[in-house]
């Protein structure tokens, strides 16, 4: 646990530097991933972390993740619009696509200031240094003949945590029977992400035997992410239409100028709805394959049959 925290604190510190460069979208992405994995470790390892400091650490990292998430979403959307532009040669559609892209770029520029502010706050507050001191001190104290998971009770906790996350995913998987249960599909994506991070965190305890499961869970998470992206596009397009109509009327005194964007907006909306159907089918089929392959049973067999005598912190 401590080695995991120490490693991701180093990654976060490094990626925070590049996240402040608006031109480096990968920096924001990697910084967000590192922050989310830290939060997962905080939640799963709360019984082994200092309670008072943990509340502060979790609060600060959660705020960072939130701001990075907003910026990352816009980066992805801007890139996807470039792809959308290549799907049609109709000039009427291009105007709508380009106008939406302009608004997303403008919004992304404003979000960068928020990203910079939250990173500066974390650096200046000393929270990162505080976390590093604790992990390094704990690692050093446990290097000689001391181990974290040295009792059946503690290892049972790990087994219980993994089982709970698997059960959460399987319960939400019922929503795959109905394409209209959008909110549950979104919850399932989040639950799958948490399961993946938990498996990655505890994988060393099982001598990396969870690798095949992690690979499948990651793929399922990606498929559900594609479904969620399509859901988001419909919302983004509808909001853009409302706001752009108001802007047009305010600036030109009439909404007629907005007509030039209608073809592109309609094209994007119809494409997103159709893509959502395809991605949803892929997600459902892949999950059914996992169930047929008894992935959850295989995972349960591994976590229930292992109780290592020595596992370093």
Image (cartoon, helix red, strand yellow):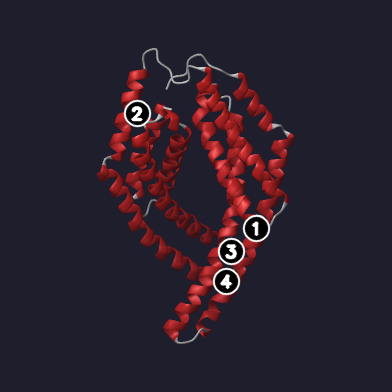
The residue identified by callout 2 is 135
The residue identified by callout 4 is 264
Q: From this viewpoint, is residue 270 visible?
A: yes
Residue 128 spot, x, y in % from top left: 31, 38
Q: Specify which label sits upstream in the sequence, 1 or 4.
A: 4
Callouts 1 and 4 close, C-beta under 8 Å: no
The residue identified by callout 1 is 275
Q: Which mark lies nearer to you, 3 or 1?
A: 3
Q: Specify which label sits upstream in the sequence, 3 or 4.
A: 3
Q: Specify which label sits upstream in the sequence, 2 or 1.
A: 2
| Residue ranking furthest to the left | 124
Callouts 2 and 3 close, C-beta under 8 Å: no
Q: From this viewpoint, is residue 25 visible?
A: no
Task: Please report the residue visible at 60 percent of the width from the left and 41 percent of the height from the top.
Answer: 219
Task: Please report the residue visible at 67 percent of the width from the left and 52 percent of the height from the top.
Answer: 280
Q: CA distance from mark 3 to mark 1?
A: 11 Å
Q: Specify which label sits upstream in the sequence, 2 or 3.
A: 2
The residue identified by callout 3 is 234
Q: Quadrant of the N terminus?
A: top left
Rendered view: 76 above or below 306: below
Task: Please report the residue visible at 38 percent of the width from the left and 51 percent of the height from the top.
Answer: 24
Please tell me how crowded label 1 is: few (under 14), some (14-19), or many (20+) other residues with Cα within 10 Å: some
Q: Which mark lies nearer to you, 4 or 2?
A: 2
Q: In front here: 219 or 299?
A: 299
Q: Say what secondary structure mark 4 lies in.
A: helix
Q: Say what secondary structure mark 3 lies in.
A: helix
């Amino acid at each position: 646990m401590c080695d995991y925290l120490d490693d991701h604190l180093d990654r976060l510190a490094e990626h925070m530097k590049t996240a402040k460069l608006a031109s480096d979208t990968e920096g924001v992405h990697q910084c967000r991933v590192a922050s989310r994995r830290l939060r997962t470790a905080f939640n799963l390892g709360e019984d082994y972390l200092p309670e008072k400091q943990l509340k502060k650490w979790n609060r600060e990292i959660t705020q960072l993740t939130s701001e990075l998430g907003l910026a990352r979403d816009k980066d992805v959307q801007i890139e996807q619009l470039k792809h959308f532009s290549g799907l049609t040669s109709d000039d009427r559609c291009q105007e709508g696509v380009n106008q939406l892209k302009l608004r997303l770029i403008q919004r992304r520029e404003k979000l960068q200031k928020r990203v910079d502010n939250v990173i500066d706050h974390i650096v200046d507050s000393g929270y990162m240094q505080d976390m590093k001191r604790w992990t390094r001190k704990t690692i050093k104290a446990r290097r000689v003949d001391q181990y974290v998971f040295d009792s059946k009770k503690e290892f049972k906790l790990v087994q219980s945590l993994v089982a709970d996350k698997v059960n959460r995913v399987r319960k939400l998987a019922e929503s795959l029977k109905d394409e209209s249960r959008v909110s549950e599909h979104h919850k399932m994506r989040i639950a799958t992400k948490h399961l993946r991070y938990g498996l990655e965190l505890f994988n060393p305890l099982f001598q990396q035997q969870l690798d095949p499961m992690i690979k499948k869970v990651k793929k399922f998470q990606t498929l559900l992410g594609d479904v969620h992206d399509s859901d988001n596009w419909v919302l983004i397009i509808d909001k853009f239409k409302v706001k752009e109509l108001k802007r047009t009327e305010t600036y030109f005194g009439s909404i007629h100028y907005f007509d030039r964007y209608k073809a592109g907006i309609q094209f994007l909306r119809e494409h997103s709805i159709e893509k959502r159907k395809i991605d949803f089918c892929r997600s459902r089929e892949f999950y059914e394959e996992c169930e047929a392959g008894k992935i959850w049973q295989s995972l349960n067999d591994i976590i229930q049959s292992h109780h290592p005598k020595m596992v370093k912190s």
